[in-house]
Image (spheres, rainbow, N blue to C red):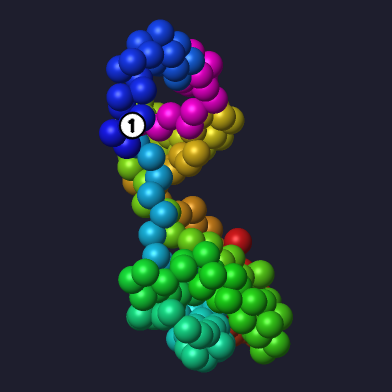
């Protein structure tokens, strides 16, 4: 190292030329550098999400959560497994041991989950991803002298348009309620068809899906 420093001292022109080359190279490479104000940070958590339309939390737990946990329980590098069964969806978070290759665990989990033969037929394909920690850059408030339905439609349109901007990775619509369908039953029609209220409720429950 001392010889190298001494050589540059003895040859100042070469040192200046090297500095100019480094600066020019940096200027030309600057446009190709990935620049993020709030960069996404990869974590050591693998997320498994399985949509199961129309299923209740208990059914989701028995038919999906338990089977996924059993399939991945003996994999190397797992520190903890946390699962949540909701209406129509199962979420399983698998935390890797500190220092363990999260990409390797992701591939192992995906292979095990895809090989489960006993998932319900009505369940959608499992989604296995590595959790990404993101920062919210900006929030937009939408309001107006219109009904809630019109605001939601306008919010959906704004979200879709913002998602088309290539610099934006994710747009979420918040503070909106799920849509509902109300069914009014006529007592006269029930008597005419010899049906009870419970029978109609059971028929609707058996044929309805959350999509």
Residue at position x 38%, y 49% in the image: 41
Q: Secondary structure at mark 1?
A: helix
In the image: residue 103, left or right of residue 117: left
* Residue 169 percent across, percent down from the top left: 50, 39
On the image, the x and y values in percent for residue 200 come to 59, 79
- Relative to 69, say whether 150 is above or below: above
As for residue 103 lying within the magenta part, the answer is no
Magenta-drawn stretch contains 33:
yes
Residue nearest the viewer, comparing 182 with 38: 38
Compared across the picture, whether 40 is left or right of 89 comes to: left
Q: Residue 100: where, in percent of width, then height?
A: 42, 72
Image quadrant assignment for residue 37: top left
Residue 11 visible (yes or no): yes
Q: In the picture provided, is 61 more to the left or to the right than 144?
A: right
Per the picture, the main secondary structure of the magenta-coloured stretch is helix
Residue under the image location 54 percent in, 25 percent down: 32
Q: Is any part of residue 193 visible from this angle?
A: no
Location of the N terminus (image quadrant): top left
Q: Residues within 10 Å of mark 1 (few under 14, many from 20)?
A: few
Q: What x and y, as percent, mark residue 132?
A: 42, 54
Please report the residue visible at 51 percent of the width from the left and 73 percent of the height from the top. 105
| Quadrant of image for the C terminus | bottom right
User: Residues in magenta?
Assistant: 24-37
Q: Nearer the viewer, residue 6 or 64?
A: 6
Number of labelled discs? Answer: 1
Q: Nearer the viewer, residue 165 or 51?
A: 165
Does 56 sit above or below residue 175?
below
Q: Is residue 196 above or below residue 99?
A: below
- Residue on which disc 1 sits: 3
Q: Quadrant of residue 18?
A: top left
Picture layout, residue 112 above or below residue 146: below
User: Residue at the location (52% across, 65% down)?
Assistant: 103
């Amino acid at each position: 190292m001392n010889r190298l420093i001494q050589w540059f001292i003895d040859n100042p022109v070469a040192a200046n030329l090297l500095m100019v080359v480094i600066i020019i190279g940096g200027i030309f490479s600057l446009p190709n550098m990935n620049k993020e104000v709030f960069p996404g940070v990869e974590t050591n958590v693998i997320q498994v999400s399985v949509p199961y339309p129309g299923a209740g939390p208990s059914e989701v737990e028995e038919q999906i959560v338990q089977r996924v946990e059993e399939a991945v329980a003996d994999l190397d590098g797992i520190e903890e497994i946390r699962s949540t069964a909701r209406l129509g969806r199962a979420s399983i978070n698998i935390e890797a041991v500190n220092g363990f290759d999260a990409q390797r665990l992701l591939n192992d989990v995906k292979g095990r989950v895809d090989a489960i033969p006993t998932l319900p037929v009505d369940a959608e394909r499992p989604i296995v991803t590595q959790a990404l920690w993101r920062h919210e850059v900006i929030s937009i408030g939408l309001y107006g002298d219109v009904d809630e339905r019109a605001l939601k439609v306008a919010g959906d349109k704004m979200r879709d348009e913002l998602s088309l901007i290539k610099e934006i990775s994710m747009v979420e619509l918040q503070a909106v309620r799920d849509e509902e369908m109300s069914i009014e039953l006529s007592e006269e029609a029930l008597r005419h068809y010899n049906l009870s209220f419970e029978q109609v409720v059971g028929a609707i429950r058996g044929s309805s899906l959350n999509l």
